[in-house]
Image (tube, helix red, strand yellow):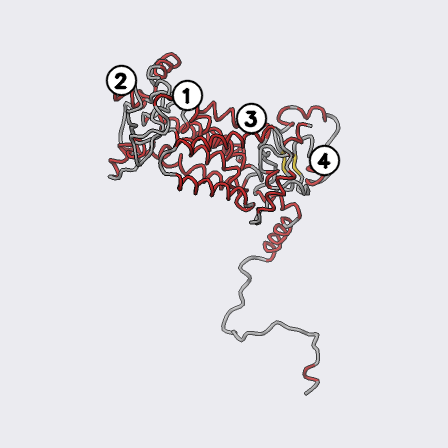
Amino acid sequence: MKNSFALRTDYQKPYIPLSWLPSMPAIIPHRIRRKLRSKIRSRQSPSTSLSSLETSLSPAHTLRSLRHHRWSFYDGQYLILIILAIFSLSIIASPGPIFKTVVATLIITSLILPATRQFFLPFLPVIIWLIWFYACGIPLIFPRIRFIPSDWRLPIWVRVLPALENILYGANISNIISAHQNTFLDIMAWLPYGIIHFGGPVVFSIIMFIFASPGTVPVFARSYGYMNLIGVSIQLIFPCSPPWYENMYGLAPANYTIKGSPAGLARIDKLFGIALYTPGFTGSPMVFGAFPSLHAGSAVMEALFMSHVFPRMRPLFVVYALWLWWATMYLSHHYAVDLVGGSLLAGVIFYVTKAKFLPRKQANKMFRWDYDYKEVGEDPVEQGYALADFGNGPHDGDDWTIGSSSSISSGSISPVDDNNSIWEGETLASHSDGEAKR
């Protein structure tokens, strides 16, 4: 009996008496399983810290990041955002102080906790834009009270945009496009203007988070936020009437007591029998914000970033931008010159960020987890700077060698940089961004 408990060396798999089942091959062939395991293990290297997310909830980590942060003039953006946020919250009469205090507390808390800071810090310009946009209008509860007094507001330009339209294009393109209306065209214009425009930034951000280089989404969020901040400020300084005003009132002088109009979107409300857009556009905070068109600017910004991530799909994104251009004019919300202004604003911001802050797309890298290092700024090969290496032959070494050796010359960020914290690496004022200038 004692020998029956002796150690055995001839272990065998347990036998399950299911002889009535036929022997079946594995669902996934062994060769494919081996390739999957190899690919997963290759991504489990120390370099995956480049694409990892912060999970700490300790404010001490944020304070440590601030102590190690190398400040530059780019950090002045946060001072501007703070001043604009305080001013906006100060002039907003409704909701009251309690609600505004809660909003400010939530924003500050999200910036203190590292786990939430990595998302809300790049998103901060978008948050300030939404507060600034609401502060430019009228409250929802007391519509007779205006946040910005009429004495502070500038005169409304009614004739400028139609005149520019005729001078530049020889006709009012918006009126020509909107002259022929039917249900099919209404729906085709409603989809990009009333649906994709509002959900597109979130969907595109998720796609870029998965497939683009780490750091692309924060740059997109800041670019999108600052574009809208600048656009709303221009609309406040240079208020212009949209095409629907000309269709309703002609070229008569406008004042700030006139309510907004859903224009062509009213046909969508009538079609579905639901007031989807009439209440929102009637009480819009920015009734006379025709120029520049932030609908067009948003579409162009999204198309440029998505083309940067997926260069082969650039024609598709160009078609999307043109589709929204047509929809804005068909629905009588913008003139063609408004679209040009918004698109130029988006283009300038994109190419400035691309040259200084936007991570480059690397060949043979499909997901963010494939990146071992990050290259920031314009590609020297695309600019023709690689002519200096003509005749030197190909460079030997793997991706890690190339990335680490060119981290300064091409603006790359090495994954082994311990000082590259979330505050450092995810802000426009990071030390890693400035390395390319040395």
Q: Pointer 1: what residue?
A: 237
Q: CA distance from mark 4 to mark 3?
A: 25 Å
Q: How far is disc 3 from disc 2 in space, using C-alphas?
A: 40 Å
In this picture, residue 311 sits left or right of residue 37: left
Q: Residue at x 58, y 40 (%)?
A: 214
Name above or below for residue 32 compared with residue 278: below
The mark nearer the N terminus, 3 or 2, is 2
Q: State how far apart marks 2 and 4 are (Cα).
A: 64 Å
Q: Secondary structure at mark 3?
A: helix
Q: Is residue 260 left or right of residue 73?
A: left
Please identify the residue farthest to the front as the structure is shown.
Answer: 97
Residue in front for this viewpoint, 120 or 316: 120
Q: Which residue is mark 4?
A: 405
State the residue position of label 3.
Answer: 352
Residue at disc 4, secondary structure: helix
Q: Earlier in the sequence, mark 1 or mark 3?
A: 1
Q: If you read the primary sequence from the N terminus, does the residue marked by circle 2 or circle 4 appear first?
A: 2
Residues at marks 4 and 1, CA–CA distance in whole angstroms: 48 Å
Badge 4: few (under 14), some or many (20 or more) residues near its Cα, within 10 Å? few
Q: Comparing marks 4 and 1, which lies closer to the viewer?
A: 1
| Amino acid type at image mark 1 | Ile
Q: Residues within 10 Å of mark 1 (few under 14, many from 20)?
A: some
Quarter of the N terminus within the rendering? bottom right
Residue closer to the observer: 229 or 154: 154
How far across and down, in percent of the image, does residue 104 sit? Answer: 46, 40
